[in-house]
Amino acid sequence: MRRWAVSVLIMGSLALGGCSVEKARALQGAALQFRNESLSAIEAIDTMRKRELEAPTRSSAEIRQAFVNRILNSKVEVSGEIIDLAIDPFQPPKVAEWDTFIADLRNQYEGFSEIFTKLDSRSTVSRDEVKKSAEYAKTLTVQMAVLAKAISDNPPVLVQHRTTAIVKLQAIKKEYQSIQARIKAGETALIARKAELENQAGEVLGEWQQIKQEEQRILELTVAQCMRAAAMGKEVIEAANHYDDLDLNQMNALIPRILTTASTFTGRDYTTLRTKATRIVSEIQTDPLWRGVAQKLLDRANAAAGSRIPDRGAEVGIRNLEK
């Protein structure tokens, strides 16, 4: 009789202090969706930076002709470094701080999903463990919203594509102004060349507009992905906070609801997307429990966003060849 009473007491304690593994698995599935979307957001952010630094595609003939022009017109002593610079003046520098930032982000979200894997391995799950996982999820969700805002405030710039267009237009402008002066002096045979240069300038305008459109496309896709992850994180937090009140069927409905919520963040309406990101961050910053954490995350995100692009390295490299 005493043994039976002890057994009832133990089972009652587990019922009061623990949760079913089935519900934990449902929460784990939602957490994995959050992790996957967050890792996709981190990949989008890193890809954005790579796109900012990449050089425009050039044919072998273009590379050869550009090298000949640069090296033969260079006013500096020829060296191995100058030869490499003449071949490719658009070589992006390595930024260790950025690589560390991205690696750390990936580790954070991978580590978050491991928490739920450990929860799934037990027959019961402590409410305290679920609560701790919700606190961690909140930090990571805040971080995704903060990243979305930081990218909106520091939009992508295709530096080398812009620089190529600027250098091309500078050359056209220089020749055009020279020809104009010569035509005024009576060299009317240059009128046809003047018209060609005007057409070339118009083509560069088209290239510039395409660059701006691509920058906007990258911005919209990256911010949308961060906001999708933040929306999923918010749903995970809500589920974890109301874990005791939700039955298994309600928990199983969590993933479809999360996917539906996340699907609304497409990037097609960027103005609305930016407004949502700004509003979420503002709400977080006014929350006394999260103000300090949010500000630290925002400072870090802004610092990382500012370190994405070198300070006009391509243009500096070209000017060095012309000294």
Image: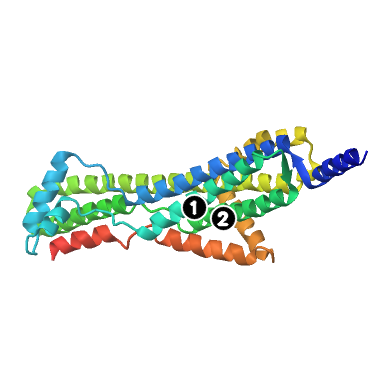
Q: Quadrant of the N terminus?
A: top right
183 relative to 225 in the view: left or right = left
Residue drawn 91% across the image and 41% down it: 2
102 relative to 254 in the view: left or right = left
Residue drawn 14% across the image and 58% down it: 81
Q: Quadrant of the C terminus?
A: bottom left
Mark 1 vs mark 2: give the one in front.
Answer: 1
Residue 259's spot in the image, x, y percent? Answer: 62, 36
Query: Compared to 27, does 129 lie above or below?
Result: below
Colour mode?
rainbow
Residue 226's spot in the image, x, y percent? Answer: 54, 48
Q: Amino acid at mark 1?
A: Leu
* Observer-nearest of 265 and 203: 265
Quarter-of-image position of residue 311: bottom left
Query: Compared to 309, does 198 lie above or below?
Result: above
Residue drawn 27% across the image and 60% down it: 313
Query: Compared to 282, does 223 lie above or below?
Result: above
* Observer-nearest of 54 and 323: 54
Residue 249's spot in the image, x, y percent? Answer: 76, 32
Marks 1 and 2 in Cβ contact (< 8 Å): yes
SS assignment at label 2: helix
State the residue position of label 2: 143
Q: Amino acid at mark 2?
A: Gln
SS assignment at label 1: helix
Quarter-of-image position of residue 119: top right
Query: Compared to 276, does 181 lie above or below?
Result: below
State the residue position of label 1: 105
In space, the residues marked 1 and 2 are separated at their CA atoms by 9 Å
Specify which label sits upstream in the sequence, 1 or 2.
1
* Observer-nearest of 304 and 152: 304
